[in-house]
Image (cartoon, rainbow, N blue to C red):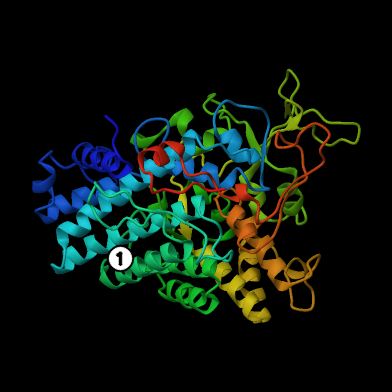
Amino acid sequence: MKFSQLQFTAMLGILVLLISGCDINTSPYNGKSNKEALDTVQGLESATRGNYQGFIGEGYYYYIKHLFYMNEFPSDNASLSGSTTDPLFYAYNYGHTPNMGNAERLWREGYSMIQGANRVIEAIGDESSSELDQIKGENLFLRALVHFQLVNTFGRPYPQNPTENLGIPIVDYTDVDKNPERATVAEVYDFIVSDLEDAAELMNESKSSSFASQEVAYALLSRVHLYMENNEEAIDYADQVIDSGRYQLVDTETFKEYFTIVNENNPETIFAIKFTQEDDKEYGNIGSMYLKGEDGVGWGEMYASESYRNALNRYEDDARHAFIEPQYKRDEDGNIETDGNGDPIVQERNGYPIYYVNKFSYQQGIVSLSSPVILRLAEMYLNRAEANAKLGNDQLAIDDVNKLRERAGLSGNELYSTSDLKHHNTVLDVVLEERRLEFAFEGHRKFDVFRNNRTMVRDYPGTHLSTGEASQTIAPDNPRVIYYIPENEIELNENLEQNP
């Protein structure tokens, strides 16, 4: 028997609710029926923890891993050092196929989380209390977040005719018999904004960065409005997060260790997907493609690209060098080998220089453990900077960029001024490069390029290049800027229209 996508995700969501084990902070619920589980505040809280756990899932393949890989591998920050049978290869080289397993799992697991949130939201209904409002607000946030992630994966960038281009189905109900059509990109974004505004109004607890709160909703609203080119709104929400006083930029030395710190202990992290030691995926963790540890855990096949390294190397004092680990050749005594100029020789794999990325490694000293950051304070400054640059407020934009550069250990002539944009032509160019340096490998770059109607230029070594090619260039209107709707979903729901 075949089940529709909503029927499948509904059953999966019930299973998550009843057996979710490694939740964020407390023990799992004790296994009451789905209806009974949602009749009490305790049950609603347990179901909500299960919805957060959906990002982590079970086993080697899971939502947040697919999301980060599918967002970052197509960027100009990443260089793949060999072929692979994993569909991630097609994410990297823009050779997408309608049956990509990564895309299908992202779709199904995403809608499973959406259905989980819908069940809690419907169970609460119009009831109101401080506890119920917080729970409902958190689920509205989660529903909005996943819709946002999916629409950016399967729908074209917002500035490209959003009222005509198709996004994803909007699912704000639990009726599993519906076969929804794809809404337009504009309709999905409007739905996301509405959910986030409602969530922010309802949430009344200042929880840790493992959970949603009012400021978390504001932070995502800042990003959503930036993507919509609602620049004044993007600034306003960024201001509300910054001015809340809940978050602080860490100092330069702490910044170098940023991603090794448990997210709840990091004052800059706004929202992250918390992984505990019990959640450690080992070879299945996000960082496994970027780094192979001394204990052998990890594949270490995706490296920092030459293009990214060239941008970073303009300023040798930039603290963001700490996130890149060149692997040097060593002699039998363990000494680093050097070339004729006395420079260390970098190891290669298949002829590609090995520069590991450690943004998803070493949490609590464990090479395969990290809690992927979704929102952090640095983004609020750079959201504000980009929006101000587009509004012509050049000095305000430069001030925010320099704040991040100073935190990265840069000073004096290494900072920008409106009369000295260094190698850039516009203030917007300055901001976008700073976003690239700051958020490399965190899943921003692809969207920052294409939503600003720019071309992705991949003119560096890697398996994205065919024999004899010097560069791969992807225009913002290229069909493969986005992924195909999974063909199995189209087979199950005849109302879904495929991407060109």
Label 1, residues with CA under 10 Å away: few <14, some 14-19, many ≥20: few
- Relative to 88, does residue 197 appear above or below in the rendering? below
Residue found at the far front of this picture? 494
- Where is residue 382 drawn, in percent x and y? 58, 67
Q: Position of residue 241 (x, y in %)?
A: 43, 71
Residue 363 seen by the camera: no
Q: Is residue 432 visible?
A: yes
Residue located at (21% from left, 42% from top): 17
Left of 369 or right of it: where is 465?
A: right
Q: Which residue is mark 1?
A: 206
Above or below 1: residue 108:
below
The residue depicted at 42 percent of the width and 38 percent of the height is 105
* Residue 419 placement: quadrant: bottom right
Q: Amino acid at mark 1?
A: Ser
Q: Position of residue 248 (x, y in %)?
A: 47, 66
Question: Quadrant where the N terminus lies?
Answer: top left
Q: Is residue 144 left or right of residue 441?
A: left
Q: Nearer the viewer, residue 246 or 8?
A: 8
Q: Secondary structure at mark 1?
A: loop
